[in-house]
Image: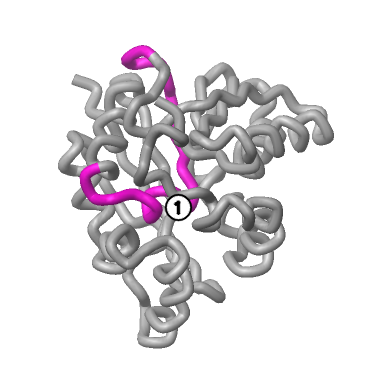
Amino acid sequence: MKFSEDPHYVPALGFHWLTPYYDALVALSTRERSFKQALIRQAGIAAGQQVLDLACGTGTLAIWLKTAHPEAAVTGLDGDPQVLAIAARKARQAKVAVRFDEGLAYQLPYPQDCFDRVLSSLFFHHLRWEDKERSARELFRVLKPGAQLHVADWGRAQNPLMRALFLPVQLLDGFANTQDNVSGRLPELLAGAGFAQVARRQRFSTLFGTLELLSAVKPAG
């Protein structure tokens, strides 16, 4: 299925006409380099591993992954061909070999048990709870036993200021979709899909609220 066939699909900034401004806005407002580099370090990627950047957007995380770990095989997946075209161009400019695929998180075009790591950045808050659940189950399916999931997304606000700063994101991406993040339900989501060792690892205060880094493991047996 493609995004054009899904009435609930939310583009990177809520509207397709905002896509050209995505990189600049994320870089300025989310401490992007700090939290994405922390996510990469957290993932502990080794040479030869198969790594998926889920909902890769314009490819920044996937490119940084490949740059940091040139001997890993990095794939980026997104449902929007417009952002995938930007990602492919950026990868060529960076002279890194990243594969970019078009597809949706809750219908992944990959076989069971094929990835050693999945990373996801600023994605789950776009989804309805039902689609969050479907996506988490798909991630569980494509990860190898003992493999790891690492997620960076909006989380429960650390204080009233962080909660107030998150309101523009909710206006842009929808109150219903983002409320699960504000309520701190992502660990519950991952545990419900079968993941073990679900943990909040780090928090970042940003211009749009609190970002959380989570990790989880697909049990080995």
Residue 105 forms part of the magenta stretch: no
Res. 117 visible in picture = no
Q: Is residue 126 left or right of residue 94?
A: left
Q: Quadrant of the C terminus?
A: top left
> What SS does tag 1 mark?
strand
x and y percentages locating residue 113 in the rendered image: 34, 16
x and y percentages locating residue 61 in the rendered image: 61, 42
In the picture as drawn, the residue positioned furthest to the top comes out as 111
Q: Amino acid at mark 1?
A: Ala
Q: Residue at x 32, y 69 (%)?
A: 156
Q: Residue at x 50, y 57 (%)?
A: 14
In the figure, residue 116 lies in which quadrant? top left
Q: Is residue 49 left or right of residue 8?
A: right
x and y percentages locating residue 53 in the rendered image: 51, 35
Q: Is residue 37 left or right of residue 114?
A: right
Q: Which residues are magenta?
A: 111-130
Q: Is residue 151 left or right of residue 140?
A: right
Identify which residue, 171 or 140, lies in the foreground: 171
Identify which residue, 212 or 42, lies in the foreground: 212
Q: Is residue 96 above or below residue 59?
A: above
In the figure, residue 193 lies in which quadrant? top left
x and y percentages locating residue 71 in the rendered image: 65, 21
Q: Residue at x 63, y 51 (%)?
A: 19
Q: Quadrant of the N terminus?
A: top left
